C-alpha cells in the first residue's frame, strides 16, 4: 500500500512540476525530479521508462543530472541508477 501511495504522489509531483515549469525559478524542474525519484524508487517499470527516456533525449538526461546535484545524496543515487551509461543497478530508497 505504501509503495502505491508513493507512486501516486510521484505522479502528482510530476504533473504539478510540468504545470509550473514555465516559472522563472527552477521549482518545476525540482518537483519533476523528485516525482521521478519517487516513481523510480517504487516501480521497476518507472525505472525502465526513465532509463529509456534518458537514452532517447540527451536534454532530459542533462536536466536530471542537474536536478540531481541539487537533491539530497539519497535521491541522487536513485536517479543515478537510471543513468544508461552506468548500467542497471538495484534501486534502494
Image (cartoon, helix red, strand yellow):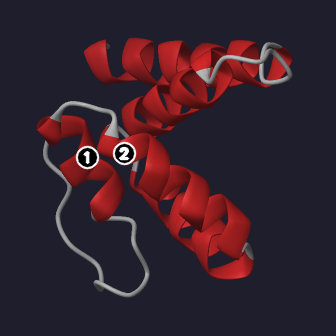
- Within-10-Å neighbours for mark 1: few <14, some 14–19, many 20+: some
Going by the image, does 8 lie left or right of 4?
right
Residue 6 sits in which quadrant?
top left
Residue 58 horizontal/vertical position (percent): 67, 75
Residue lying at 62% horizontally and 80% vertically, measured from the top left: 55
Residue lying at 46% horizontally and 41% vertically, measured from the top left: 67
The residue that label 2 is drawn on is: 68
User: Farthest residue in the front direction?
Assistant: 24
Residue 19, compared with residue 11, is above or below; it is above
Residue 70 horizontal/vertical position (percent): 34, 35
The residue that label 1 is drawn on is: 76
Residue 47 horizontal/vertical position (percent): 44, 57
Residue lying at 62% horizontally and 31% vertically, measured from the top left: 29
Give how far apart the Cα atoms at labels 2 and 1 are. Answer: 5 Å
Residue 28, compared with residue 62, is above or below; it is above
| Disc 2 and disc 1 in contact, CB within 8 angstroms | yes
Disc number placed over residue 67 in the picture, else none: none
Which mark sits nearer the N-terminus, 2 or 1? 2
Going by the image, does 4 lie left or right of 14?
left
Work out whether residue 15 or residue 29 is closer to the camera in this orientation and state it. 29
Residue lying at 46% horizontally and 50% vertically, measured from the top left: 66
Q: Secondary structure at mark 1?
A: helix
Residue 93 horizontal/vertical position (percent): 15, 37
Residue 79, compared with residue 31, is above or below; it is below
Please say whether residue 40 is visible from this viewpoint.
no
Amino acid at each position: 500500500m505504501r509503495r502505491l501511495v508513493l507512486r501516486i504522489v510521484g505522479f502528482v509531483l510530476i504533473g504539478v512540476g510540468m504545470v509550473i515549469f514555465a516559472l522563472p525559478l527552477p521549482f518545476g524542474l525540482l518537483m519533476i525530479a523528485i516525482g521521478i525519484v519517487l516513481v523510480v524508487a517504487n516501480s521497476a517499470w518507472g525505472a525502465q521508462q526513465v532509463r529509456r527516456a534518458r537514452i532517447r533525449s540527451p536534454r532530459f538526461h542533462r536536466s536530471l543530472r542537474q536536478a540531481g546535484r541539487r537533491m539530497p545524496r539519497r535521491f541522487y543515487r536513485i536517479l543515478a541508477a537510471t543513468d544508461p551509461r552506468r548500467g542497471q543497478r538495484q534501486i534502494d530508497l
